[in-house]
Image (cartoon, helix red, strand yellow):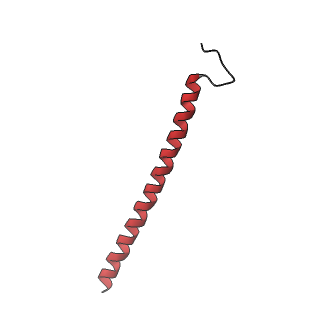
Amino acid sequence: MYASHGSCTPHIKRQKKRKKRKGKEREEKKKKRKKEEKKKEKRKEKKKEGKER
């Protein structure tokens, strides 16, 4: 066992870091997904305009 200083044993520190990193990755994925959706919508609008002309 580790000598615990507060609740900061090495494995807990690692877990916290991992959690933070995963959170950031999740946020980035959300942003990417939103961008992709916007691109798709724009494409659909362009197709509609093309059909109307």
Measuring 51% from the left and 40% from the top, which residue is drawn there?
Answer: 21
Q: Is residue 27 above or below residue 5?
A: below
Measuring 32% from the left and 76% from the top, which residue is drawn there?
Answer: 47
Q: Is residue 32 above or below residue 50?
A: above
Q: Position of residue 3 (x, y in %)?
A: 64, 15
Q: Quadrant of residue 33?
A: bottom left
Q: Please indicate whether residue 40 sits to the left or right of residue 18 in the image.
A: left
Q: Is residue 11 above or below residue 32?
A: above
Q: Position of residue 27 (x, y in %)?
A: 51, 50
Q: Can you say which quadrant of the picture contains the N terminus?
A: top right
Measuring 34% from the left and 78% from the top, which residue is drawn there?
Answer: 48
Q: Position of residue 34 (x, y in %)?
A: 46, 60
Q: Can you say which quadrant of the picture contains the C terminus?
A: bottom left
Q: Please indicate whether residue 5 sits to the left or right of residue 42 in the image.
A: right
Nearest the viewer among 33 and 20 is 20
* Count of residue discs: 0
Q: Quadrant of residue 36?
A: bottom left
Nearest the viewer among 5 and 28 is 5
Q: Please indicate whether residue 34 sits to the left or right of residue 50 in the image.
A: right
Q: Position of residue 23 (x, y in %)?
A: 53, 43
Measuring 54% from the left and 34% from the top, which residue is drawn there?
Answer: 17
Outermost residue to the top: 1
Outermost residue to the right: 6
Outermost residue to the bottom: 53
